[in-house]
Amino acid sequence: MFAKYAYRRLSLLCFMLFTLTIFTFALNYLFPGELITNFSGEVNSSYAQTQALVEKYRIEENIFVQYGAFMARMFEGDWGLSLSSGQPVLSHVKHLFPATLELCLYALTVAVIIGVPSGVIASAYHKKWPDKLINSLSLMGFSIPVFWLALLLIMAFCLGLGLFPMSGRIGLLYEIQPVTHFILIDIYLEGFPYGGAAFWDALHHLALPTVVLAMYPTTVLIRFTRDSMLEVLDQNYIKTARAKGLNRSQLIIHHALRNALLPVIKQIGLQFSTLITLAMITEVIFSWPGIGRWLIESIYQRDYPAIQGGLLAVSFFVIIANMLSDFIHSILDPLARNQAHGKV
Amino acid sequence: MRKLFFGVLCTALFGCTDQAPNKVNDKSQGLVYCAEANPVSFNPQVTTTGSTIDIIANQLYDTLISIDPESGEFLPELATSWQVSEDGKSFTFTLRDDVQFHDTLYFTPTRKMNADDVVFSFNRLFDVYNPYHFVGDANYPYFQSIGLDQLIRQVKKVDEHTVRFDLFNAESSFLSNIGTDFAVILSKEYADQLIELEHKQDFDQKPVGTGPYKYREFLRDNLIRYYRHEHYWKHPVYMEQLVYDITTNGTSRIAKMLTKECDITAHPSATQLTVLEQRKDIEVEKAANLNIGYWAFNTEKPPFDNTLVRKALAHSIDFEKIMQAVFYNNGILARSMLPPSSWAFEAQQKMPTYDPEKAKEYLKQAGLEGGFSMTLWAMPVSRIYNPNARKMAELIQRDLRDIGVNARIVEYEWNTFIERVGRHEHDSVLLGWAADTPDPDNFFSPLLSCTATFSGKNPSNWCNPEFDLLLTQALDTNDMEERKYYYQQAQKMVIEQLPLVPIAHGLRFQATSSDIKGVSLRPFGGISLAEARRD
């Protein structure tokens, strides 16, 4: 059964990735400007260079051959050059993506740590004051636009109280060698240089962007956990357990939580795609050197090879993350495997 | 599991403090300068962009001589003394013998600076046989626009520490130009090494100079990191590190200044000055600066090839409103092409004034009473001579509508913008010029001469032989009164022909953390952080 399920999911994944590459390939034709520049990012190339590029990209052959050549280059890691920096697009993606991923992971961790327990508390005290308080707070958090929240926090904590810095990942005077491109891990690998000051500085820089980015998924998780918990608490086996005389904490921890968390786990995975989108806005506001800020700059500067590369990387990641969460969910919840057909 | 978690947490929190620090806490020994744009290159020979010059010129390099900002006298730098031949055609410089080039991750010098380096640095500019002449498009905008490449006959090594410049003809601004931020001395040894490694294109991107700081890394849109040059010849460098935080957004720059993420902020706008002035820990400096903000027309494109049309457009704009809304009255309304502090300045009687009726009249005379459509390019960055080109463009657009001219505002990223204006793709453009030397020629030759047209520096695309003759005559003589006369004629001609409309001269602003000392604003050229220190 699981093999069939996995096969279905994997074929859906392949199909989606295939569609994604076709879309990216088509962008070369849809963007204004020279086809060869859109493909390669080379501007003002000499006659000989242009001929070499035409040959390499098979521009003079039919569209299928061109697509084949495009895919071959993608696999080789030749994603063209960025128009604005002249550097390979793939190297930008490799350097910037971890920063975004780092931010998203921390935000997701915060969301889970705060969201799930709050949801459980809200359901446990259904229609009592903790429930009402958590509910109204989560509604506020859910409704506030992320850029507005970011600006408010900057106003209060950076400009007003001077507690946190408002941009970047670390104070620029700390020179940290990028190894994994995850700043905290890189600092750890360097053995906490500057007497650990760099580590604290990086945590300071992380605080506000993480809080801002975590706001939306936290509220979603609170509401989701609460609803799911209430549904489970309404089940007959819980009522039986309660009739047997179990107290509230026993009921929730030993009987309800595991079942209620199953849909929540799936939701955590699904939050990743929303997170990446919100991360772009957060990155721009906090000058976080991640892929989102770079992508938005590239759009502003009409840097077509960079836009293509950035879109491909981000979409690729979102698709994979969704599929992974689906898999994990199905491993934990055997019932989900019955639903063999893929759903997007 | 729980134990493991606490174990990791303890290592993370306390492990770091127990460990002997392997690097000192550099925060107090470093300086963060918030810059407004990415540098175009790391060699001042190949660019004139002010934001780039601020970042690279005085920090990484030295010149043979410099110009005293107050007295205008020439001061020795890498050259300890110099002699001029009687006919004014030959300049001999005696060089310092204790100057070391930067020792970086990519280059270790084996000898000190000598005459070979000076000969190489200048030969690159005009000698087509120099292996580096064509590296990076063979474009040396400043030198080409002032015609220095046509002036120098040869640069000759007399001995190890003596260099002689032979000129085709005597020119009074030669020494001034040798004293600009563009005439830097590069390492010939490094150049030779790159030729061997076949990495010639790295020469302008991974710099090696003799200046107070040496290059470490550049992350585009993010930062530039320099380290102290331990063997700097002139004086000890206080700052261990110098980091440029590239923040293109003006408001973010100010916010970073307030949160102390920046120690120095380039070009805060006049509107933000009040916020900064309220803070005790921030010092705001205002300095007079030799510059001009102007509106240039592409005189090769119709209808802008017609002087009447240019006059009409010039008379249509409300200068007073621009001074209030863009400069917040922190600037001087232009009355000539030259700023009033220049020694050749003469207020022009025929300076265009706001007069829409007159403008319509000129349009009628040009046969364009029905109006026309044009593009108005506005620079995307804030500069001394134009703190907010977008706003200025909107005001002009509004004024032009009154005389029936429909203007579309065009904006690009700064480096792209400069490149396209250099290719003369615009109809009209709001730009400006900040002087590199106090010599008046610095305002005319790089902006309005025929040679500047060819090197893509002349945004008016205006080439007038009569005007060029005036400039040449002014350069051919050393008699100050005579030079003054020619420059006055030149100023008059600019206002009569109006290839560009001079708008205003801005003040240079800078916000500096009050514990930072040794940073001085000069009326011309880029900023120098060589003596910056934290008290």
Image (spheres, coloured by chain):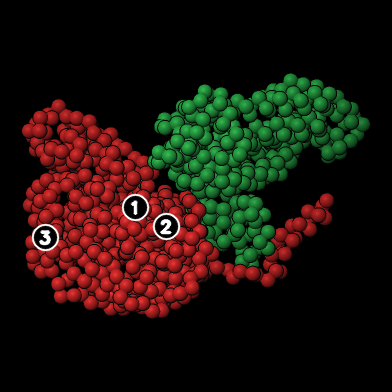
Which residue is under mark 2? B204
Q: Label 1 marks which chain's residue? A: B
Please give left or right for residue B474 compared with residue A8 in the image.
left
Q: Quadrant of residue B159?
A: bottom left
Residue A170 badge? none
Q: Distance between the residues labelled 2 and 1?
A: 12 Å
Task: Work out whether disc 2 and disc 1 sit on a shared chain.
Answer: yes
Q: Of marks 3 and 2, which one's residue comes earlier in the chain?
A: 2
Asked whether residue B50 appears in the rendered view, the answer is no
Q: Nearer the viewer, residue A328 or A2?
A: A2
Check the rendered structure and report the hue given to chain B. Answer: red
Residue A127 percent across, percent down from the top left: 71, 32
Residue A39 falls left or right of residue B139: right
Residue nearer the viewer, B135 or A270: B135
A327 above or below A156?
Answer: above
Residue in the image at 74% along x and 23% along y: A8
Q: Judging from the image, what secondary structure is the residue with disc 2 in?
A: helix
Disc 1 marks which amino acid?
A: Ala
